[in-house]
Amino acid sequence: MPYRRIAATLAAHGLATVMGSSRTCPQRLFTSERERRDAVREVILAGEDPTGLDQRAYTGIS
């Protein structure tokens, strides 16, 4: 699971993270429509369903 690898890397630097399913939080703005599409594609390739979350991504593209 990618999350475990990320959590282990953060822990090696003294940082902690938790995985919660109760809500989602926008992390940052995408820099372009292409970046948004690529991120959604990666979510799908990881076996996750972006419906209702990443597909209507937090974006600052005007």
Image (spheres, rainbow, N blue to C red):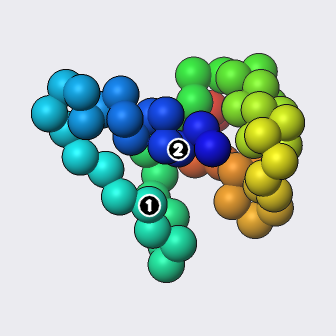
Question: Residue sitting at 49 percent across and 34 percent down?
Answer: 5
Q: Is residue 41 left or right of residue 13?
A: right
At numbered mark 1, what does the secondary structure look like: helix, strand or loop?
Answer: loop
Q: Quadrant of residue 53?
A: bottom right
Among numbered discs 2 and 1, the one appearing first in the sequence: 2
The residues tagged by marks 2 and 1 sit, at their Cα atoms, a distance apart of 8 Å
Note whether residue 41 is visible. yes
Q: Quadrant of residue 61?
A: top right
Question: Residue sitting at 39 percent across and 40 percent down?
Answer: 7
Q: How far across and how far down the image is residue 8, in percent?
A: 37, 35
Question: Residue sitting at 14 percent across and 33 percent down?
Answer: 14
Question: Which residue reaches farthest left?
Answer: 14
54 over 59 or under it: above or below:
below
Is the Cβ of the residue at disc 2 closer than 8 Å to that at disc 1? Answer: yes
Q: Residues within 10 Å of mark 1 (few under 14, many from 20)?
A: few
At numbered mark 2, what does the secondary structure look like: helix, strand or loop?
Answer: helix
Count the marks: how many?
2
Task: Using the image as rendered, state which of residue 28 and residue 3 is in the foreground.
Answer: 3
Q: What amino acid does circle 2 point to?
A: Tyr
Note whether residue 59 is visible. no
Task: Using the image as rendered, state which of residue 4 and residue 40 is in the foreground.
Answer: 4
48 over 2 or under it: above or below:
below
**Circle on res. 35:** none
Q: How far across and how far down the image is residue 1, in percent?
A: 63, 44
Q: How far across and how far down the image is residue 58, in percent?
A: 57, 47
**Circle on res. 3:** 2
Q: How far across and how far down the image is residue 3, in percent?
A: 52, 44
- Residue that label 1 marks: 19
Q: Quadrant of residue 31?
A: top right
Q: What amino acid does circle 1 point to?
A: Met
Q: Residues within 10 Å of mark 2 (few under 14, many from 20)?
A: few
Q: Is residue 49 left or right of residue 27?
A: right
